[in-house]
Image (tube, rainbow, N blue to C red):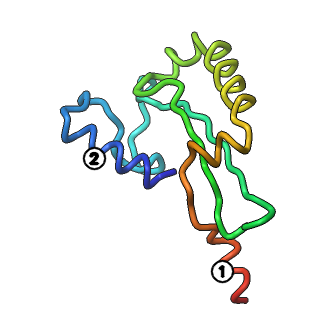
Amino acid sequence: MRLAETARSQAARNQGAPPDYMDDHWLTIEYKEDLPHTLAVASFFTSSQDDSVIFKMEAILDEHQPFAAIKVRLDELLNRGLWMLNSWTPDIIVAKGQQLENLKKKYSEGM
């Protein structure tokens, strides 16, 4: 997920992202109460017929918001995220999700 965040931040910076957009690693950034955060959900599916591939589906629920703004809408955001996760059947995840190589499988077989 960190690579996706980095790619998104690079794209956002190129398109004139807000100046408070957090582009640094979360362990090294100076903490402020109003730091922007992103709340997202993700679901993964591995087929029993071909476990060398993982399918990933994700959605951003809210982005570039301080914790205080997320906290006010937390119930709504969590309910929306739960609804999304429940609606993503394996067929939908395979059809619409991102296909990734199962690196755990790949490297565990070689050991």
Spatial CA span between label 1 and label 2: 30 Å
Residue 50 percent location from the top left of the image: 73, 67
Q: Hey, which residue is sitting farthest top in the picture?
A: 72
Secondary structure type for disc 1: helix
Residue 57 lies in what quarter of the image? Answer: top right
Nearer to us: label 1 or label 2: 1
Which percent across, then down, holds residue 100? 56, 61
Judged from this view, the residue extending furthest toward the right is 48
Q: Which residue is mark 1?
A: 107
Q: Is residue 79 left or right of residue 3?
A: right
Residue 77: give x, y in percent of width and height.
61, 19
In the image, is 53 to the left or to the right of 2? Answer: right
Asked if residue 56 is positioned above or below residue 16 in the image, the reply reads below
Q: Tag on residue 10?
A: 2
Neighbor class of circle 1 (other Cα within 10 Å; few <14, some 14-19, many 20+) is few
Q: Amino acid at mark 2?
A: Gln
* Residue 30 x %, y %: 39, 40
Q: Type of residue at label 1?
A: Tyr
Give the residue at x 54% y 18%.
Answer: 70
Label 2 Cα crowd, 10 Å radius (few <14 / some 14-19 / many 20+): some
Q: Are marks 1 and 2 in contact (CB under 8 Å)?
A: no
Q: Residue at x 71, y 51 (%)?
A: 45
Q: Quadrant of residue 54?
A: bottom right
Q: Nearer the viewer, residue 91 or 41?
A: 91
Q: Nearer the viewer, residue 90 or 100?
A: 90
